[in-house]
């Protein structure tokens, strides 16, 4: 009626100029032919006109999982009528592609070698999250029991590079030698072992070796 007061909040979220959205290869249908944009992407976007997206975000429609791989501007925004949508290509179900934005931002803060070790391993997203939150590693007292020395090692060693940070060992640098005999910078391997009980190189379980079981 004329006496009704209407309150409305205007959504000021901007629209993307361009967005690149790709499907994961292993979620695409194989039993029939389809047109990716017309059969999957467009119906989802039409059904969710007010959803906000950002780079590296995921969504699923009719069993097909998509990822926003790039957007312009690089911010949180909506996909509107003026947005140019690219969907050429497919994503392999690799760990790097499967991790949500919050986990990828945590991974990005780690040393380069540690990032490679985490993302190249056959681990689930949940396992990586637990490792990032230091819920799968050794106790501090166990780490302190591992052999420590200043480079070079007392009995010589062929390994010249720390495979966590990917930098060469330098004179007098604090290092640790794991029971499997692989050597790392102390700071690097301590950080790794707080998150994982295995040697980064050979995957031998350090906890079992230290406890002799």
Image (tube, rainbow, N blue to C red):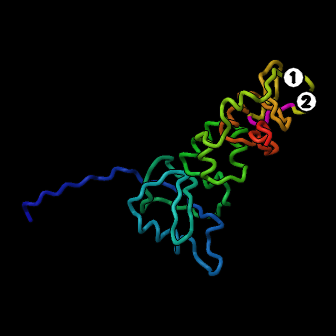
Camera-side residue of 209 and 121: 209
Q: Position of residue 109 (x, y in %)?
A: 61, 36
SS of the residue at dot 1?
Answer: loop
Query: Between disc 2 and disc 1, whose residue precedes?
Result: 1
SS of the residue at dot 2?
Answer: loop
**Seen in the image, is 62 located left or right of residue 48?**
right
Crowd rating for badge 1 (residues with CA inside 10 Å; few <14, some 14–19, many 20+): some
Seen at 65% across and 51% down, the residue is 96
Seen at 44% across and 52% down, the residue is 77
- Residue 26: name its quadrant: bottom right
Q: Position of residue 165 (x, y in %)?
A: 74, 34
Q: How many marks?
A: 2
User: Looking at the image, is 171 positioned above or below residue 56?
Assistant: above
- Part of the protein shown in magenta: 160-164
**Seen in the image, is 151 located left or right of residue 134?**
right
Q: Position of residue 151 (x, y in %)?
A: 83, 22
Quarter in which the N terminus is drawn? bottom left
Quarter in which the C terminus is drawn? top right
Q: Main secondary structure of the magenta part?
A: loop
**Is-magenta flag for residue 78?**
no
**Which residue matches tag 2?**
157
User: Looking at the image, is 153 positioned above or below residue 191?
Assistant: above
Camera-side residue of 72 and 193: 193
Q: Position of residue 137 (x, y in %)?
A: 66, 40
Seen at 56% across and 51% down, the residue is 100
Crowd rating for badge 2 (residues with CA inside 10 Å; few <14, some 14–19, many 20+): few
**Seen in the image, is 30 located left or right of residue 168?**
left
Label at residue 152? 1
């Amino acid at each position: 009626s004329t006496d009704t007061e209407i309150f409305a909040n205007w959504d000021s979220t901007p629209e993307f100029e361009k967005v690149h959205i790709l499907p994961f290869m292993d979620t695409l249908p194989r039993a029939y032919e389809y047109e990716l944009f017309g059969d999957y992407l467009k119906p989802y976007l039409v059904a969710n006109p007010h959803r906000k997206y950002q780079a590296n975000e995921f969504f699923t429609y009719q069993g097909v999982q998509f990822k926003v791989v790039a957007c312009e501007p690089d911010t949180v925004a909506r996909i509107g009528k003026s947005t140019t949508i690219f969907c050429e290509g497919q994503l392999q179900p690799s760990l790097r592609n499967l991790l949500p934005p919050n986990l990828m931002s945590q991974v990005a803060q780690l040393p380069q070698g540690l990032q490679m070790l985490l993302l190249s391993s056959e681990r689930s997203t949940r396992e990586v999250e637990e490792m990032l939150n230091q819920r799968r590693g050794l106790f501090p007292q166990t780490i302190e029991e591992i052999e420590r020395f200043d480079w070079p090692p007392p009995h010589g060693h062929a390994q010249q590079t720390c495979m966590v940070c990917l930098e060469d060992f330098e004179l007098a640098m604090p290092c640790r030698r794991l029971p499997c005999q692989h050597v790392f910078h102390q700071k690097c391997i301590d950080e790794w072992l707080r998150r994982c009980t295995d040697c980064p190189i050979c995957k031998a379980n350090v906890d079992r070796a230290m406890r002799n079981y």
